Image (cartoon, rainbow, N blue to C red):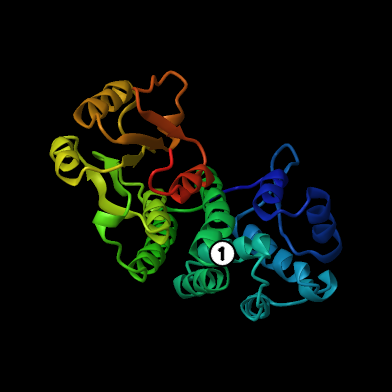
Amino acid sequence: MGQFSISDLEHLSGVKAHTIRMWEQRYGILCPVRTATNIRTYCDDDLRRLLNVALLCGRGHRISKVASLSEQELAQAVVACHDEPHDYARQVSALLAAMLDMDEPQLSDLLDKAIGKLGLEAAMLNIAYPFLQRVGLLWQAGSITPVHEHIVSNLLRQKMLAATESLRAVAPATARRWVLFLPEAELHELALLFMYYALRARGQHVLYLGQNMPLVGMQEICQQYQPYALCTVMTAQPDRSELQSWVNNLAQLCPGPKLYLYGPLAQQEDLVLPSGARRIRLMTDFLTLAEEKVGAE
């Protein structure tokens, strides 16, 4: 699995490199391996232990006491922590440690507590998204498998769907109408599900088409549903070579509604936006759009 430098550990845990070195030298909390050029490298177990130690120290526990705990005692102490609702960094670290252990019940419990204390939107923006960014770094380092990623994404999907289902239904005749969908072969759905919740929570009506939606049929949908706007998230699809033509085709098929584009591919500098189309760079920008009342432009 992954091998980490001390700067990797600093970035993933939020603990400064000089503090990591001190904890290692004085208390032996980590067991790095040295390369042929005498550079320390750390393994998954080191990262997991560092996350747990940092969590407890951040709650006021003395490092000398934490360092003396066995792995089992350390895990029990972490589970016993009741984080303050706005203590985002430690909640992210706790999620990372649970994910590395493939502890799905603990992951679910941590997410439920965050959502219960903060609400879905604040929990996603301040905890889940930073957590997903750390997951991406671990993926790049080769320290997690697709199993880890699927556990996380499926849990978050479940939480967002449950929260959305609990919202009061909105009559389409009295609300601004949106169509949300992902391009054909696009499967990265978490951002779109968050948008779905945000719009519904603000009294908008949403026709949610979900993943892998071909352009065929979009014209008929727009003619019948008469949406205020279409919104899509482009993470891996369309292919970069087809991106411009795909956006142009969508605008031609659905010339009436506004078109909002979100995701890495939407930020390509060479992408020329058709009339009525707009990039959404940040999720907070989308939330501002969702706050707009009918009749506001």
x 78%, y 49%: residue: 17
- x and y, in percent, of residue 137 in the image: 55, 46
The secondary element bearing badge 1 is classed as helix
x 40%, y 51%: residue: 195
**Horizontal arrangement in the rendering, residue 93 relative to residue 215 (left or right):** right
x 53%, y 53%: residue: 129
**Furthest residue in direction front, as rendered:** 295
Q: Residues within 10 Å of mark 1 (few under 14, many from 20)?
A: many
**Horizontal arrangement in the rendering, residue 152 relative to residue 110 (left or right):** left
Q: Give residue 218's quadrant in the image.
A: top left
Residue toward you, 237 or 19: 237
Q: Give residue 214's quadrant in the image.
A: top left
Q: Give residue 252's quadrant in the image.
A: top left
- x and y, in percent, of residue 204 in the image: 35, 54
Q: Locate the C terminus and report the quarter of the image it occupies.
A: top left
- x and y, in percent, of residue 24 in the image: 80, 59
- Can you say whether 200 is above or below 243 in the image? below
Q: How many marks?
A: 1
Residue toward you, 281 or 58: 281
- x and y, in percent, of residue 105 in the image: 46, 75
- Can you say whether 108 is above or below 89 in the image? below
Residue at numbered disc 1: 95
- Can you say whether 79 is above or below 132 in the image? below
Residue toward you, 161 or 231: 231
Residue toward you, 264 or 20: 264
**What amino acid is found at the position of numbered circle 1 in the picture?**
Leu
